[in-house]
Image (spheres, rainbow, N blue to C red):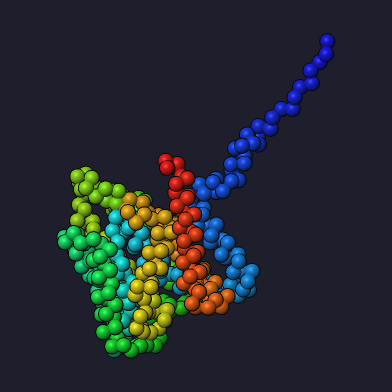
Amino acid sequence: MSLKTPSAAPDLAAGPPERTASRMSPRALLRVPHGGLIVVLVLVALFTALQADSFTSSQNLLNVLRQISVTAVIAAGLTLLMTAGGMDFSMGSNAAVTVSVGATLLHDGRPTAVTVIVTLLLATLIGLVNGLVVTFTRVAPFVATLASAMLLDGVALLVLDGESITIGQRMWALGNDKVLGVPYLCVVAIVVLAVIGLAMRFTTFGRDAFAMGGNEHVARLSGINVSGRKLALYALAGGLAGLAGLMLLSRLGAAAPNTGGLQLQLTAVAAVVIGGTSLAGGHGTVVGTVLGVVLLGVVANALNLLQVNSYYQLVVTGGVLLVAAIINEFQRKSAPGH
């Protein structure tokens, strides 16, 4: 009687071959939260580090952190507002008004505390007016706030009268000092992002924002004070725009025509959108917004370090954003439930 040689036992720890392969596939990578955005960010950072030694220097990294902190504060407010189905294209212009008014007050000898309070109240009021227009006139948020942005850009120019205004050493510490090696501006941005993120995840206010973005009519029928929530969201966005303006003023030490404005706004919107927050509302993520802000900051810094012709910088930035947005969309579709 012949004995049959037993076949080799399968390696159960390794798992089925097809499952192991799938873990290493691009599709599996896209299932990682914000995996596509992280890949693009890492590739850009590695390429820049190999091409420019100064990219990884502490001084350059601190400069990047200071630069992106202003955008991060505006993007935080936009994330919450867009999650609720709203939009404010005037936040960058609101920051420009804050810069010009704040610089004028400080230049005229007003106390720093008074200047901060006045400018923040003004910025919040501007946001509240946007909310009133959007809520009670039924004008589309895009149209109302874009018109507001143009108006505010004009107001900023009028306040400055076309000239630059310096503030000397006033507010210098906020824009240039560090705590435990981290710039104060970055600390402010981290606190704002953390508060917005926690509010979206754990508070009734945040849950109401998701409900309004998903279906405003259903949210109203479920007992949510939609009008009140909208006013609060736009006022909050305005207040954060004012804070971003004060941060920008402290970093630059002066106010000049075209400081802030639409370019700052578009950068923030791009960061929020490629970070995964839906333009249609109902979905938003602060973590994605942070990654979007960092990606934009790293790309801008890389182009400067590599001395790319300014004519090509917008082309390259737009291309990187497009690639990140496409990867992000593939990731969204590959997520469970799609």
Residue 193 percent coordinates (x, y): 40, 61
The residue shown at (43%, 69%) is 69
Quadrant assignment, res 114: bottom left
- Which residue is at a point 28% across and 58% down the rendered structure image? 86
Q: Closer to the camera, 238 or 135? A: 135
In the image, taking residue 293 as reference, residue 304 lies left or right, namely right
Side of 316 relative to 226 (left or right): right
Identify the residue at the far left of this view: 136
Position of residue 110 measured from the top left corner of the image (x, y, whole percent): 28, 85
Residue 204 visible here:
no
**Quick one: 101 or 303, which is closer to the camera?**
303
Q: Nearer the viewer, residue 48 or 114?
A: 48
Residue at left 27%, top 51%? 212
Q: Position of residue 45 (x, y in %)?
A: 57, 65
Q: Is any part of residue 17 visible from this angle?
A: yes
Q: Is residue 248 left or right of residue 54?
A: left
> Residue visible at 30% across and 48% down?
214
Quadrant in the picture for the C terminus: top left
Query: For the view shown, which residue lies furthest in the top direction?
Result: 1
- Residue 200: percent from the left, percent from the top? 35, 53
